[in-house]
Amino acid sequence: NPWPSIENLSKWYASTTKSAEDIGMNHPIALQGRRREEIFVYAYEKVDGTNLGIKCDGTIYGRRTKVADGARSYQNVPLGKHNIPPYDTTLAKVKSSLVSLEQVVTTKLPPNNKKAPELILYGELVCIPERYGYEDRGMKSKWLCFGGILVFDDSNANSNTAQEVFSSLAKKGFLVHRRGAEIVLNMNPTLQSLLEDNGIECPRFVDQGTLKDVCLRQKGLMMKSQLEGLVITGENFITKWKIGDEDESSGLSDLKSLLAEKKVRDEDEDDVDGKRALIVDIELTNCLIEVAGNKTKEKGMKKKKVVNNDYDDDILSKAIISAYSKYDALDTYFSNNDVNTIINALVKELVDDLGASSKGQLRCINKFVGSAIGNAYKKW
Protein backbone atom coordinates (compact mmCIF):
# COMPACT_ATOMS: atom_id res chain seq x y z
CA ASN A 1 0.00 0.00 0.00
CA PRO A 2 2.52 2.64 -1.07
CA TRP A 3 1.82 6.33 -0.73
CA PRO A 4 0.64 7.66 -4.13
CA SER A 5 3.24 9.35 -6.31
CA ILE A 6 2.71 13.12 -6.47
CA GLU A 7 3.00 15.05 -9.72
CA ASN A 8 5.04 18.23 -10.01
CA LEU A 9 2.86 21.37 -10.00
CA SER A 10 4.42 22.99 -13.08
CA LYS A 11 4.18 19.78 -15.09
CA TRP A 12 0.59 19.24 -13.93
CA TYR A 13 -0.44 22.76 -14.91
CA ALA A 14 1.06 22.42 -18.38
CA SER A 15 -0.38 18.95 -18.99
CA THR A 16 -3.93 19.87 -17.88
CA THR A 17 -4.16 23.05 -19.97
CA LYS A 18 -6.97 22.81 -22.52
CA SER A 19 -8.38 24.98 -25.26
CA ALA A 20 -11.79 26.62 -24.97
CA GLU A 21 -13.12 24.09 -27.48
CA ASP A 22 -11.59 21.09 -25.69
CA ILE A 23 -13.02 22.08 -22.32
CA GLY A 24 -16.63 22.31 -23.50
CA MET A 25 -19.52 21.92 -21.11
CA ASN A 26 -18.86 18.27 -20.29
CA HIS A 27 -15.19 18.61 -19.37
CA PRO A 28 -14.37 18.13 -15.64
CA ILE A 29 -12.99 21.67 -15.44
CA ALA A 30 -16.30 23.08 -16.67
CA LEU A 31 -18.36 20.75 -14.50
CA GLN A 32 -16.49 21.90 -11.38
CA GLY A 33 -17.76 25.38 -12.12
CA ARG A 34 -14.35 26.87 -11.46
CA ARG A 35 -10.99 27.27 -13.14
CA ARG A 36 -7.95 25.30 -12.00
CA GLU A 37 -6.45 28.45 -10.53
CA GLU A 38 -9.46 28.83 -8.23
CA ILE A 39 -9.24 25.41 -6.55
CA PHE A 40 -9.07 25.92 -2.77
CA VAL A 41 -5.84 24.44 -1.46
CA TYR A 42 -3.61 24.04 1.59
CA ALA A 43 0.17 24.35 1.41
CA TYR A 44 2.61 22.51 3.69
CA GLU A 45 6.39 22.45 3.70
CA LYS A 46 7.78 19.54 1.67
CA VAL A 47 10.41 17.94 3.88
CA ASP A 48 13.42 16.36 2.19
CA GLY A 49 13.92 13.00 3.93
CA THR A 50 12.83 9.43 3.32
CA ASN A 51 9.26 8.15 3.07
CA LEU A 52 8.29 5.93 6.01
CA GLY A 53 4.89 4.36 6.64
CA ILE A 54 3.72 3.05 10.03
CA LYS A 55 0.87 0.56 10.21
CA CYS A 56 -1.46 0.18 13.17
CA ASP A 57 -0.05 -3.32 13.82
CA GLY A 58 3.50 -1.98 14.13
CA THR A 59 4.71 -2.86 10.63
CA ILE A 60 6.98 -0.20 9.10
CA TYR A 61 7.34 0.42 5.37
CA GLY A 62 9.96 2.25 3.35
CA ARG A 63 9.05 3.81 0.01
CA ARG A 64 9.61 0.54 -1.84
CA THR A 65 10.05 -2.23 0.72
CA LYS A 66 8.91 -3.38 4.14
CA VAL A 67 11.39 -2.59 6.90
CA ALA A 68 12.65 -5.70 8.70
CA ASP A 69 10.68 -6.58 11.85
CA GLY A 70 12.46 -5.31 14.93
CA ALA A 71 14.71 -2.96 12.94
CA ARG A 72 16.26 -0.37 15.23
CA SER A 73 17.14 2.10 12.49
CA TYR A 74 16.30 3.14 8.95
CA GLN A 75 18.59 5.24 6.75
CA ASN A 76 20.91 5.30 9.78
CA VAL A 77 18.23 7.08 11.82
CA PRO A 78 17.33 5.30 15.10
CA LEU A 79 13.71 4.17 15.28
CA GLY A 80 12.15 4.46 18.72
CA LYS A 81 9.55 6.14 20.89
CA HIS A 82 11.43 9.43 20.55
CA ASN A 83 10.44 9.73 16.88
CA ILE A 84 8.02 6.91 15.94
CA PRO A 85 4.49 7.07 17.45
CA PRO A 86 3.54 3.89 19.37
CA TYR A 87 1.26 1.83 17.14
CA ASP A 88 -0.61 0.17 20.01
CA THR A 89 -1.69 3.45 21.61
CA THR A 90 -1.27 6.56 19.48
CA LEU A 91 -2.06 5.03 16.08
CA ALA A 92 -4.91 3.06 17.62
CA LYS A 93 -6.48 6.31 18.89
CA VAL A 94 -6.13 8.00 15.50
CA LYS A 95 -7.65 4.99 13.75
CA SER A 96 -10.53 4.90 16.20
CA SER A 97 -11.23 8.58 15.64
CA LEU A 98 -11.25 8.11 11.87
CA VAL A 99 -13.41 5.00 11.52
CA SER A 100 -15.83 5.55 14.39
CA LEU A 101 -17.12 8.97 13.41
CA GLU A 102 -20.52 7.40 12.90
CA GLN A 103 -19.72 4.16 14.69
CA VAL A 104 -19.39 2.51 11.30
CA VAL A 105 -17.19 -0.27 12.62
CA THR A 106 -19.66 -1.49 15.21
CA THR A 107 -22.94 -0.80 13.46
CA LYS A 108 -22.40 -0.80 9.70
CA LEU A 109 -20.28 -3.90 9.08
CA PRO A 110 -22.08 -7.13 8.12
CA PRO A 111 -22.90 -9.28 11.21
CA ASN A 112 -20.52 -12.02 10.08
CA ASN A 113 -17.63 -9.63 9.50
CA LYS A 114 -16.62 -7.13 12.19
CA LYS A 115 -13.11 -6.53 10.87
CA ALA A 116 -12.20 -2.86 10.93
CA PRO A 117 -9.96 -1.31 8.25
CA GLU A 118 -6.22 -1.04 8.83
CA LEU A 119 -4.57 2.37 9.15
CA ILE A 120 -1.16 3.28 7.74
CA LEU A 121 0.23 6.72 8.51
CA TYR A 122 2.87 8.04 6.14
CA GLY A 123 5.50 10.61 6.92
CA GLU A 124 8.95 11.92 6.11
CA LEU A 125 11.83 10.70 8.28
CA VAL A 126 14.44 13.46 8.48
CA CYS A 127 17.64 11.57 7.63
CA ILE A 128 19.71 14.47 6.23
CA PRO A 129 19.59 17.03 9.07
CA GLU A 130 22.06 19.40 7.40
CA ARG A 131 19.58 20.13 4.61
CA TYR A 132 17.46 23.29 4.79
CA GLY A 133 18.36 23.97 8.40
CA TYR A 134 16.51 20.91 9.72
CA GLU A 135 18.94 20.40 12.59
CA ASP A 136 18.80 24.06 13.63
CA ARG A 137 15.01 23.83 13.53
CA GLY A 138 14.98 20.80 15.84
CA MET A 139 13.87 18.41 13.11
CA LYS A 140 16.82 15.99 13.15
CA SER A 141 15.66 12.34 13.10
CA LYS A 142 12.02 13.37 13.42
CA TRP A 143 9.20 11.61 11.62
CA LEU A 144 6.65 14.12 10.29
CA CYS A 145 3.31 12.67 9.20
CA PHE A 146 1.90 13.98 5.91
CA GLY A 147 -1.08 11.66 5.33
CA GLY A 148 -2.64 8.27 5.84
CA ILE A 149 -4.43 5.38 4.18
CA LEU A 150 -7.31 3.32 5.53
CA VAL A 151 -7.11 -0.18 4.02
CA PHE A 152 -10.26 -2.32 3.90
CA ASP A 153 -10.09 -6.09 3.48
CA ASP A 154 -11.48 -7.58 0.27
CA SER A 155 -14.81 -8.51 1.83
CA ASN A 156 -15.55 -4.89 2.74
CA ALA A 157 -13.72 -3.03 -0.02
CA ASN A 158 -16.70 -3.01 -2.39
CA SER A 159 -19.42 -2.90 0.25
CA ASN A 160 -21.23 0.14 1.57
CA THR A 161 -18.86 0.15 4.55
CA ALA A 162 -15.91 1.80 2.78
CA GLN A 163 -18.16 4.32 1.05
CA GLU A 164 -19.90 5.25 4.30
CA VAL A 165 -16.57 5.76 6.06
CA PHE A 166 -15.45 7.85 3.07
CA SER A 167 -18.61 9.99 3.13
CA SER A 168 -18.39 10.44 6.90
CA LEU A 169 -14.77 11.58 6.73
CA ALA A 170 -15.53 14.00 3.88
CA LYS A 171 -18.42 15.54 5.84
CA LYS A 172 -16.13 16.05 8.80
CA GLY A 173 -13.71 18.09 6.68
CA PHE A 174 -11.03 15.51 5.83
CA LEU A 175 -9.48 15.52 2.35
CA VAL A 176 -10.17 11.98 1.15
CA HIS A 177 -10.29 10.03 -2.09
CA ARG A 178 -10.90 6.39 -2.94
CA ARG A 179 -8.19 4.12 -4.38
CA GLY A 180 -9.67 0.67 -4.79
CA ALA A 181 -9.97 -0.90 -1.34
CA GLU A 182 -8.33 2.16 0.24
CA ILE A 183 -9.28 5.61 1.46
CA VAL A 184 -6.38 8.05 1.11
CA LEU A 185 -6.26 10.99 3.54
CA ASN A 186 -4.27 14.02 2.37
CA MET A 187 -3.00 16.67 4.76
CA ASN A 188 -5.23 19.58 5.71
CA PRO A 189 -5.99 21.39 9.01
CA THR A 190 -8.61 18.78 9.99
CA LEU A 191 -6.20 15.86 9.73
CA GLN A 192 -3.38 17.94 11.17
CA SER A 193 -5.45 18.74 14.28
CA LEU A 194 -6.37 15.09 14.80
CA LEU A 195 -2.75 13.99 14.51
CA GLU A 196 -1.29 16.74 16.67
CA ASP A 197 -3.95 16.19 19.34
CA ASN A 198 -2.52 12.66 19.56
CA GLY A 199 1.08 13.83 19.77
CA ILE A 200 2.00 13.21 16.13
CA GLU A 201 3.99 16.00 14.48
CA CYS A 202 3.24 17.15 10.93
CA PRO A 203 5.10 19.26 8.37
CA ARG A 204 4.83 23.03 8.81
CA PHE A 205 1.60 24.60 7.59
CA VAL A 206 2.39 27.48 5.23
CA ASP A 207 -0.73 28.88 3.58
CA GLN A 208 -4.25 28.30 2.31
CA GLY A 209 -6.47 29.88 -0.33
CA THR A 210 -6.99 29.53 -4.07
CA LEU A 211 -4.17 27.80 -5.95
CA LYS A 212 -3.24 31.02 -7.71
CA ASP A 213 -3.26 33.16 -4.58
CA VAL A 214 -1.15 30.66 -2.62
CA CYS A 215 1.43 30.39 -5.42
CA LEU A 216 1.70 34.15 -5.86
CA ARG A 217 1.98 34.73 -2.10
CA GLN A 218 4.62 32.02 -1.63
CA LYS A 219 6.71 32.87 -4.69
CA GLY A 220 9.11 34.89 -2.52
CA LEU A 221 9.56 31.96 -0.11
CA MET A 222 10.24 29.58 -3.00
CA MET A 223 12.75 31.95 -4.60
CA LYS A 224 14.82 32.07 -1.39
CA SER A 225 15.57 28.35 -1.81
CA GLN A 226 15.49 27.76 1.95
CA LEU A 227 13.20 24.71 1.76
CA GLU A 228 12.74 21.86 -0.70
CA GLY A 229 9.31 23.08 -1.69
CA LEU A 230 5.63 22.82 -0.84
CA VAL A 231 3.04 20.06 -0.96
CA ILE A 232 -0.26 21.53 -2.10
CA THR A 233 -3.48 19.65 -1.32
CA GLY A 234 -7.14 20.21 -2.12
CA GLU A 235 -10.31 18.33 -2.94
CA ASN A 236 -9.21 15.45 -5.20
CA PHE A 237 -5.98 17.36 -5.72
CA ILE A 238 -2.38 17.03 -4.56
CA THR A 239 0.84 18.26 -6.17
CA LYS A 240 4.38 19.10 -5.13
CA TRP A 241 5.87 22.50 -5.93
CA LYS A 242 9.66 22.25 -5.73
CA ILE A 243 12.18 25.08 -5.76
CA GLY A 244 14.22 25.45 -8.95
CA ASP A 245 17.27 23.63 -7.57
CA GLU A 246 15.13 20.60 -6.66
CA ASP A 247 12.80 20.53 -9.67
CA GLU A 248 14.03 17.81 -12.02
CA SER A 249 10.78 17.48 -13.96
CA SER A 250 10.13 18.80 -17.46
CA GLY A 251 7.74 21.36 -15.98
CA LEU A 252 9.85 24.40 -16.88
CA SER A 253 10.24 23.48 -20.55
CA ASP A 254 6.60 22.34 -20.70
CA LEU A 255 5.37 25.72 -19.44
CA LYS A 256 7.59 27.64 -21.84
CA SER A 257 6.28 25.51 -24.70
CA LEU A 258 2.76 26.14 -23.45
CA LEU A 259 3.17 29.93 -23.63
CA ALA A 260 4.73 29.66 -27.09
CA GLU A 261 1.80 27.55 -28.29
CA LYS A 262 -0.67 29.97 -26.75
CA LYS A 263 0.95 32.86 -28.63
CA VAL A 264 0.68 30.98 -31.93
CA ARG A 265 -2.97 30.16 -31.37
CA ASP A 266 -3.83 33.69 -30.22
CA GLU A 267 -2.41 35.01 -33.49
CA ASP A 268 -4.30 32.47 -35.63
CA GLU A 269 -6.50 34.62 -37.88
CA ASP A 270 -8.55 31.60 -38.93
CA ASP A 271 -9.70 30.99 -35.34
CA VAL A 272 -12.32 33.74 -35.42
CA ASP A 273 -14.29 32.46 -32.41
CA GLY A 274 -11.19 31.81 -30.31
CA LYS A 275 -12.14 28.16 -29.81
CA ARG A 276 -8.54 26.97 -30.17
CA ALA A 277 -7.20 29.53 -27.70
CA LEU A 278 -5.53 27.92 -24.69
CA ILE A 279 -7.06 28.72 -21.29
CA VAL A 280 -3.95 29.84 -19.42
CA ASP A 281 -3.50 32.16 -16.45
CA ILE A 282 -0.45 34.14 -17.56
CA GLU A 283 0.35 35.53 -14.11
CA LEU A 284 0.35 32.09 -12.48
CA THR A 285 2.26 30.53 -15.38
CA ASN A 286 4.99 33.17 -15.22
CA CYS A 287 5.21 32.64 -11.44
CA LEU A 288 5.73 28.89 -11.92
CA ILE A 289 8.30 29.51 -14.67
CA GLU A 290 10.28 31.96 -12.55
CA VAL A 291 10.43 29.57 -9.58
CA ALA A 292 11.31 26.51 -11.70
CA GLY A 293 13.99 28.48 -13.53
CA ASN A 294 15.68 29.74 -10.36
CA LYS A 295 18.65 27.36 -10.54
CA THR A 296 21.04 28.89 -8.02
CA LYS A 297 23.31 25.83 -7.89
CA GLU A 298 24.04 26.03 -11.60
CA LYS A 299 25.32 29.61 -11.55
CA GLY A 300 29.05 29.69 -12.27
CA MET A 301 29.24 25.92 -12.74
CA LYS A 302 30.79 24.34 -15.79
CA LYS A 303 28.63 22.01 -17.79
CA LYS A 304 29.19 18.37 -16.90
CA LYS A 305 30.59 16.07 -19.51
CA VAL A 306 28.21 13.70 -21.26
CA VAL A 307 28.54 10.01 -20.45
CA ASN A 308 28.08 7.72 -23.47
CA ASN A 309 26.12 10.55 -25.14
CA ASP A 310 23.13 9.54 -23.03
CA TYR A 311 23.13 11.07 -19.51
CA ASP A 312 25.56 13.48 -17.92
CA ASP A 313 27.05 13.01 -14.46
CA ASP A 314 24.80 15.63 -12.89
CA ILE A 315 21.57 13.98 -14.06
CA LEU A 316 22.68 10.54 -12.90
CA SER A 317 23.92 11.86 -9.55
CA LYS A 318 20.61 13.60 -8.83
CA ALA A 319 18.65 10.51 -9.89
CA ILE A 320 20.61 8.12 -7.67
CA ILE A 321 20.33 10.44 -4.65
CA SER A 322 16.56 10.36 -5.08
CA ALA A 323 16.67 6.57 -5.48
CA TYR A 324 18.76 6.13 -2.30
CA SER A 325 16.00 7.79 -0.25
CA LYS A 326 13.52 5.06 -1.20
CA TYR A 327 15.52 2.29 0.48
CA ASP A 328 17.37 1.61 3.71
CA ALA A 329 20.97 2.76 4.18
CA LEU A 330 23.57 1.02 2.02
CA ASP A 331 25.28 -0.26 5.19
CA THR A 332 22.27 -2.48 5.82
CA TYR A 333 22.61 -4.22 2.46
CA PHE A 334 26.38 -4.52 2.77
CA SER A 335 26.24 -6.11 6.22
CA ASN A 336 23.60 -8.59 5.01
CA ASN A 337 25.66 -9.55 1.93
CA ASP A 338 22.77 -8.25 -0.17
CA VAL A 339 24.66 -5.97 -2.55
CA ASN A 340 23.04 -7.28 -5.74
CA THR A 341 19.56 -6.57 -4.37
CA ILE A 342 20.21 -2.87 -3.86
CA ILE A 343 22.11 -2.56 -7.16
CA ASN A 344 19.19 -4.08 -9.10
CA ALA A 345 16.69 -1.91 -7.21
CA LEU A 346 18.63 1.30 -7.88
CA VAL A 347 19.07 0.47 -11.56
CA LYS A 348 15.32 -0.01 -11.89
CA GLU A 349 14.67 3.30 -10.08
CA LEU A 350 16.96 5.20 -12.45
CA VAL A 351 15.57 3.49 -15.54
CA ASP A 352 12.01 4.37 -14.51
CA ASP A 353 12.90 7.88 -13.33
CA LEU A 354 14.84 8.81 -16.48
CA GLY A 355 12.63 6.89 -18.90
CA ALA A 356 15.64 4.97 -20.21
CA SER A 357 14.96 2.67 -23.16
CA SER A 358 17.93 2.50 -25.54
CA LYS A 359 20.76 0.02 -25.05
CA GLY A 360 23.16 2.92 -24.56
CA GLN A 361 21.04 4.49 -21.83
CA LEU A 362 20.61 1.19 -19.99
CA ARG A 363 24.32 0.45 -20.25
CA CYS A 364 25.11 3.95 -18.98
CA ILE A 365 22.83 3.53 -15.93
CA ASN A 366 24.13 0.06 -15.07
CA LYS A 367 27.72 1.27 -15.25
CA PHE A 368 27.00 4.35 -13.12
CA VAL A 369 25.11 2.46 -10.41
CA GLY A 370 27.68 -0.33 -10.32
CA SER A 371 30.49 2.19 -9.91
CA ALA A 372 28.63 4.16 -7.21
CA ILE A 373 27.82 1.07 -5.14
CA GLY A 374 31.29 -0.36 -5.69
CA ASN A 375 32.93 2.81 -4.35
CA ALA A 376 30.53 2.92 -1.40
CA TYR A 377 31.26 -0.72 -0.60
CA LYS A 378 35.02 -0.08 -0.62
CA LYS A 379 34.57 2.80 1.83
CA TRP A 380 32.37 0.60 4.01
Image (tube, rainbow, N blue to C red):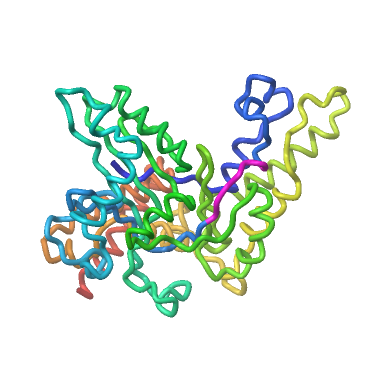
Q: How many numbered circles does the render carry?
A: 0
Q: Is residue 59 left or right of residue 169?
A: left
Residue 198, image x, y percentages: 32, 59
Residue 327, image x, y percentages: 27, 57
Q: Is residue 344 visible?
A: no
Instruction: Please say if 97 is above or below 292.
Output: above
Q: Which residues are magenta?
A: 37-43
Residue drawn at point x = 46 percent, y = 58 percent: 315
Residue drawn at point x = 55 percent, y = 61 percent: 206
The answer to whether residue 38 is magenta is yes
Q: Is residue 58 left or right of residue 120?
A: left
Quadrant in which residue 375 is drawn: bottom left
Quadrant in which residue 242 is drawn: bottom right
The N terminus, quarter of image: top left
Instruction: Please say if 174 is above or below 243.
Output: above
Q: Nearer the viewer, residue 196 or 332?
A: 196
Q: Is residue 33 left or right of residue 128?
A: right
Q: Nearer the viewer, residue 327 or 334?
A: 327
Instruction: Please say if 108 is above or below 82.
Output: above
Residue 339, image x, y percentages: 17, 59
Residue 66, image x, y percentages: 20, 50
